Amino acid sequence: MSDTVHAGDRAEAAIPDVDRTQIRFLTPDMCRIHLGNLGALHITIKSEGIWGGLYTAYAFPVAYPNGFISIIQTAGEQDTELGVIRDLDEFPESDAALIREALNRRYFIHTVTRLKTITMKYNMLYLEVDTDKGSVDFFMRWAQDRAVDYGQTGKVLIDLDDNRYLIPDIEKLPMKEKMEFTRYIYW
């Protein structure tokens, strides 16, 4: 029997004594994170083998951006959670960097550094902003589900194409930008 659990294999057969209703925290002493074939994310868990076909997902992206990261294998029609990384800083930097890259691919988000304008056009909000990835202008529906709370004082804005724009702290915006923002997005 191979020590590799492929995406099409049944993961339950490789770890029969795992209670799927309990969280299994992954630690650096029990596993190693690495790239497999074609640069895909893999994890080797001692006494289990190599797991491929993995993706990562935050459990609490706002409260714990560096922890509670779920490692999930896609196998056929059902995903299997291999475990949760409680704190990424516990892992060697090379392993942590691979997890961060996987998270960045999944959670691509623009961080707004300046709000140039926000106006109402065509019964939608039109925003021109500077972000960490350059200048962007976009439309978003003027609806509460399009401006989601981020922590205590931040917002994530979701445009018509479901792209996300993060304003980490509205209170830290310059007064003019803050007033213009809260004029339209006050919830």
Image: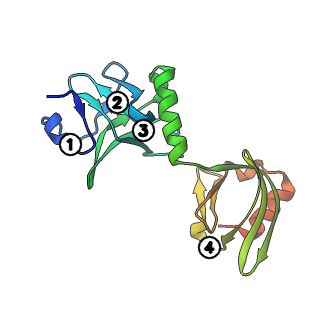
What's the residue at 21%, 43% (across, down)? 20
Lateral position of residue 25 relative to residue 92, left or right = left
Of badges 1 and 2, nearer the viewer stands 1
The numbered mark at residue 143 is 4
The numbered mark at residue 9 is 1
How far apart are the two marked residues, 3 and 2, measured between alpha carbons? 16 Å
Q: Does any portion of residue 66 appear in the rendered image?
A: no
Give the camera-side residue of 164 and 73: 73
How far apart are the two marked residues, 1 and 2, measured between alpha carbons? 15 Å
Q: Earlier in the sequence, mark 3 or mark 2?
A: 2
Q: Position of residue 84 (x, y in %)?
A: 36, 36
What's the amino acid at mark 3? Phe
- How crowded pointer 1 is (Cα within 10 Å; few <14, some 14-19, many 20+) is rated as few
Residue 57, relative to residue 157: is it above or below?
above
What's the residue at 37%, 21% (across, down)? 28
Q: Earlier in the sequence, mark 3 or mark 1?
A: 1
Residue tagged 3: 68
What's the residue at 26%, 52% (across, down)? 76
How far apart are the two marked residues, 4 and 3, measured between alpha carbons? 30 Å
Secondary structure of the residue carrying numbered label 1: loop
The numbered mark at residue 81 is none
